[in-house]
Image (spheres, rainbow, N blue to C red):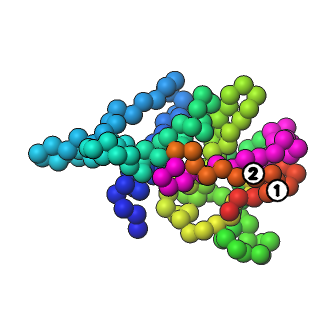
Amino acid sequence: PYDTQKVQAQWLTRGVLETAASQSIDKMMLYELKDAPTADNGNYSYSGLLTPSSKPKRSWYHIMTLKNILGEYSFERRIKNGENSFLVQTRPAGSSNPNAWVAANEETQLRVYEFKQGSEKIYVIWSPTGNAVAPFEARITFPSSTLDPTGGATLHQIKELSEKGRRWNWTPHVSGQTININ
């Protein structure tokens, strides 16, 4: 249901996250900054972050949001559901049924990556496929040694046409060691 620019932005975002998770490289760079249409309009003629006239495309904003939020943080690990007391659950949005919470399947529904800089941590929560397009809620329970409930939490989301994303004080959604995300 998405236009080509949205799909490109999603693919590049996923590519950046998956490349970071591979831990096989230290720094990453995108080589195609600006679209370069040619007479044959080959596969990569429109794979840049900018249009031929240097206007930012959706992918520019997605990549800049990742850069601005993750900055110098390094990938630390992929959180496996149930590993070291992490619990990732989902349920359909708006459901008030407490029994509707189910363990998230990270391959099709939700992935959680930990990035670190010194003692600070950022958790990237994302869906690797279109299976999670339907609105849902996520509940992530962290081990007691991981989350400082008094330190607060900030949620950053990719926002269309923004290089900084959408930022919310998420502290009211932290209950003990659990964060609820719509």
Quick one: 22 or 58, which is closer to the camera? 58
- Give the labeled residue for mark 2: 169
- 172 left or right of 128? right
Of 142 and 102, the residue lying toward us:
142
Answer whether residue 78 is visible to the viewer in this image. Answer: no
When the figure is inspected, residue 142 is found, relative to residue 90, above or below; the finding is above
**How packed is label 2: few (under 14 Cα within 10 Å), some, or many (20 or more)?**
few
SS at badge 1: helix
What range is drawn magenta here?
141-162
What residue sits 38% from the left and 49% below the top?
A: 57
Q: CA distance from mark 1 to mark 2?
A: 8 Å
- Residue 155 on the magenta segment: yes
Label 1 close to label 2 by CB (< 8 Å)? yes
Identified at 30% across, 39% down, the residue is 34
Closer to the camera in the image, 110 or 74: 74
Is 38 above or below relative to 107?
Answer: above
Q: What number is the disc on residue 172?
A: 1
| Residue at 69% across, 67% down | 91
Quick one: quadrant of the N terminus? bottom left
Query: Regarding mark 2 in the picture, which secondary structure is present there?
Result: strand
Query: Residue 8's spot in the image, x, y percent?
Result: 38, 51
